[in-house]
Image (cartoon, helix red, strand yellow):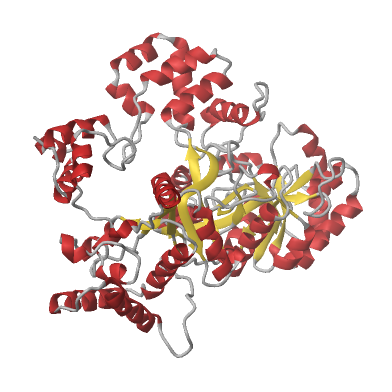
Amino acid sequence: MCTPHDKFVHLHVHSHYSLLDGLSKVEDLVKKAKEFGMTSLALTDHGAMYGAIEFYNACKDAGIKPLIGVEAYIANRTRFDRDPQLDNKRFHLTLIARNLQGYKHLMKMVSKSNLEGFYYKPRMDKDLLREYGDGIICLSGCPGSEFITLLREHKNREARELIQFYFECFGKEHVFIELMNHPEVEWYAALVPEIKKIAEELGRPIVGTWDSHYLCTDDVLAHDTLLKINTNNAGFKMNGDYSFIDQKRACEIFNETPEAINNTSLVADLVDIEIDTKSWFFPTFPIPEGTTFDSELRELTFSGFERLGVEKTPEVMERVEYELKVISDKGYPSYFLCVADFFRAGKELGIFGQTRGSAAGSMVAYLAGISNINPLKYGLLFERFLNPDRPSLPDIDMDFADDRRDEIIDYARGKYGDAAVAQIGTFGTMAARGAVRDIARALGYPYATGDQISKIIPMGSQGFPMTIDRAMEMVPELKEQYDNDRATAEIINLAKKIEGNVRHISVHAAGVVISPTGRVDDFSPLQFDPKAEGKTEGKVITQYDMYTGGREGIINLPKFDFLGLRNLSILAEAIDRIKKIRGIDLDIEAVGLDDKKTYELFGRGETMGVFQFASPGMQKWLKELQPSNLEDLIAMASLYRPGPMAFIP
C-alpha cells in the first residue's frame, strides 16, 4: 500500500508547448510542483523541446530537479518512409535526458525527427534511438506506444523483444516499464498483468506515470476547447482526468502497484544534468594563422581612416582606443568582424544595407564599415551601445533591402556552413482578442458573438500587452456585459484560461544564429518553418526563441539581426532608375544633408513612407516646425514619443 513516505515524481507532463494539446504554462507547472512538495519534475512535450530551457531555469530557481524529456513520435518503419498506407501511424515513446550528453543527443534526435522524419508529425525511428541512445532514459510509453500496441495485438514475444531492443539502445539500467493508469482507457487494465510479468521477467522496474495536460480538474473544459481549436472538430475531446495530480492522488491511482510510485524516484535519481545557460559563443570568424580577433579588428578599424578620410586627431584616437579596449575586454571582436563582413559582402553583391540604432554611437563601427555615421560629428555616445559595466551583448541591427535579404543569409551559410546557420523561431501566443474569438468559435457561437466581445477589448501595444483582466478594469461596458450576459461570461472565463498560451511557432522577423561548432543543433533543437509547403523543406529555425537567451539570442548563441527593409529596396530601385533614365551614377552616401527642397517637403508634411515621419501626428508637427536642417529633424524624431511629446510646442 502507498504511504506518505513514497515519493511520486511526474515523469510524463505536457505544457502549452505541446501546441494546442497542453494548457499548462511552464511557470505554473513548476509552481504547482513546489506547492505539492515535489523535488523533481519532468517535461515531456509532444515531439518538441520548445520549453526545455525555460523549464530548466524555472526548476532551478524553485529548487526542483529538472528532468528534460520529450514524448517522441516513433515511425512505423523508418523516418524517411512516407507511404500513406503504411506510414500514417506512429507510436509514442517517453525519453528523458540523463546527463548533458543525453540532453545534446535529445536535441539531435528531435532535430532529425523534424528535418528528416516529418510526416504529419516529427518522427524518430529505431536508427536514431541506436545512434543517440547514450545518456538517455527510456520509459516504454503510454497506451499509444509500440510496446502497448504489441500487447493489445497479443504479440507478447515481439513486445519483449522491443524492450530488449531498448536495452541495446539506452543500456538496460536506463530502461523502465511505464504504467499509465487512466481508468477511462478501459482496455488498458486487461494488459496490466502482462506488463508486470514482462517487467519482472526482464528485471526492470515499473514506473507509474500520469498523462498531465492541464493543472487542475476544473481546467478540463478549457483543454477540451483547446483541442477543438486544434482539430477544428467540435466533438473532439479527451475523456477523463489529465490534470497535474498530487502525491495523495498518485497513491490512490497506483494503490495496487505501490512500487510504481517509489520507482519514479529511481528515474529522477539517475538524472544529473547541468546546462550552461550563461556563456555566449560567437562564430569562429576565419582569420589568418598567427593573428588574433583583436589584431584583425584593429587592422580593419584603422583601414577606415584613409578610406573615409577621417583625420587622426587626439580626440578621435582616444575614442577609438577606448572603444577597442572595451570590445576586446568583453570578448566581442569576432562579432564585429562578422558583422563588418556581412556589410562588405552586401556591398560586393550590390545589396543596399545600413545600420541603425545605438551601434551608430561607435567610432569603431564607423571605421570598420558597419555604420555610415561618424558619431563624433553628432555627439553620439558609445556607452549607449556598449557599456564597460554592463554585461549586455552588442546588438547591431543590420538593415538590408527586403527583396535581397535572403541573399545575405545565404552568404552566411556559404561562409560558415549550412548546418551552422539557422533563423530563430518565435512563438505566436493567444492574445486577449484572439483567445475570445477562438473560444467563441470552438463553443459553437455565431462569429458575430465572439467578434462583438473581442472588439470591446482595447488593442495592446509593444511592451504593454492587453489582457482580459486589464480590459475588464479599463472598459466598464465589457465588465457590465460579463456580469449580465451568460454567453459573454462563458466565453471570457474560458478565454482567460487559454490566454497567453502558445498557439504556433514561426520565423523571427530578423534573428539568425551562427554556431561556432558548425552545427546549430549542438545548442538548440531545429525544425522547418511550419509554413513550408509539405514541411520537408524551407527555412530551418530554432525551437528555442530569442527569450531563451534573454532577448540577446537563443541559449549560448547571440543573435544576428538581418532586417529586410522595404524603404531600402525602394531607394535601390530609385538609384537604378536614375542611372537608366539620366545616366547618373548616384552615390547615396555622398548626397548632401543641406538640400533646401527636401526640408521644404518635410515642412509641407509630405512624408508618406518616410521612416518615423509618416504618421499624421508627426506630419502635423512638421508643418508647425518648418524644419530647415538635420538637427530639427533629429529633435522632432526624439520628441515624438510618449512623455516628451508634451514638450513639442
Q: Quadrant of the C terminus?
A: top left
Task: In the displayed orientation, state which residue is furthest to the top.
Answer: 484
Where is residue 85 drawn, in percent x and y? 87, 40
Residue 31 found in image quarter: top left
Question: Where does the image place residue 364, in percent across and percent down from the top left?
Answer: 28, 71
Question: Is residue 505 shown to the viewer in this render?
Answer: yes
Residue at 57% over, 26% down? 225
* Residue 194 vs residue 404, the one in the foreground: 404
Q: Answer yes or no: is residue 64 visible.
A: no
Q: Residue furthest bottom?
A: 290
Q: Position of residue 166 (x, y in %)?
A: 77, 61
- The image shows residue 358, relative to residue 426, as above or below, that is below
Q: Residue at x 17, y 78 (%)?
A: 318
- Depth check, front residue: 117 or 512: 512
Number of marks: 0
> Who is closer to the viewer here, 427 or 256?
427
Residue 179 as seen in the image, left or right of residue 51: right
Residue at 65%, 21% (x, y): give it.
234
Outermost residue toward the front in this view: 582
Residue 563: x and y in percent read 43, 52
Q: Looking at the image, which is closer to me, 523 or 497?
A: 523
Q: Quadrant of residue 328?
A: bottom left
Residue at (27% x, 76% y) in the render: 305
